[in-house]
Image (spheres, rainbow, N blue to C red):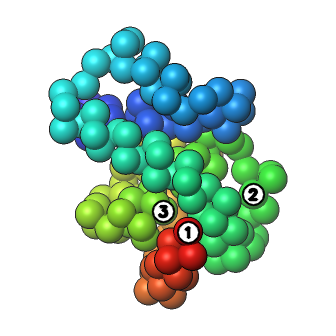
């Protein structure tokens, strides 16, 4: 497994735990890193994903709901929802990961952690979001300015 893919996997595990069990993110991350230590640069990447997604989870969810209305968020599996939040955060907020890379990584995580239909589902939802990238980035920027 590629190093950044492994880092994303750890971030996903933390986000899933926080989403379902409402555990403190810092503690969940610490425990995951005890199990699977990462080099400093990957540790920082993982932290940015976890805390970036958590700080904007509501906004990311509302944007996913707006631009992919055929998939109601309350009907999306928690693992798939967190995979999409991560990819969306990477290409719409963080902007250091090219869109295609973020989607490919999300599909790989869906293959590893999701159901049999998850990879196709995640790819479809994220693909529909990319059609609105510029508008989404503007909206996210406006939301961040308000914080």
Dot 3 falls on a residue whose secondary structure is helix
Query: Compared to 96, does 45 lie above or below?
Result: above
Q: Which mark is residue 73?
A: 2
Q: Quadrant of residue 35?
A: top left
Q: Residue 89, image x and y in percent?
A: 46, 60
Q: Residues within 10 Å of mark 3 (few under 14, many from 20)?
A: many
Q: Which mark is residue 83?
A: none
Q: Residue at x 28, y 61 (%)?
A: 97
**Where does residue 75 sit, x and y in percent of width and height?**
80, 52
Quadrant where the image shows the N terminus: top left
**Along the viewing direction, whichever of 50 and 107 lies nearer the viewer:** 50
Q: CA distance from mark 2 to mark 3?
A: 14 Å
Residue holding disc 1: 147
Assess whether mark 1 and mark 3 are in contact (beta carbons under 8 angstroms). Answer: no
Q: Nearer the viewer, mark 3 or mark 1?
A: 1
Q: Residues within 10 Å of mark 1 (few under 14, many from 20)?
A: few
Q: Position of residue 135 (x, y in %)?
A: 51, 87
């Amino acid at each position: 497994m590629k190093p950044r893919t492994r880092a994303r996997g750890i971030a996903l595990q933390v986000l899933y735990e926080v989403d379902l069990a409402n555990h403190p993110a810092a503690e969940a991350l610490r425990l995951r890193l005890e199990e699977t230590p990462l080099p400093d640069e990957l540790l920082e990447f993982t932290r940015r994903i976890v805390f970036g997604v958590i700080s904007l989870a509501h906004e990311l969810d509302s944007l996913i709901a707006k631009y992919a209305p055929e998939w109601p968020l309350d009907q999306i599996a928690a693992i798939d929802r967190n995979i999409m939040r991560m990819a969306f955060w990477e290409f719409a907020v963080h902007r250091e990961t090219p869109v295609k890379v973020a989607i490919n990584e999300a599909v790989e995580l869906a293959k590893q952690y999701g159901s049999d239909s998850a990879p196709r589902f995640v790819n479809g939802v994220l693909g529909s979001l990319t059609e609105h990238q510029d508008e989404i980035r503007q909206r996210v920027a406006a939301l961040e300015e308000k914080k």
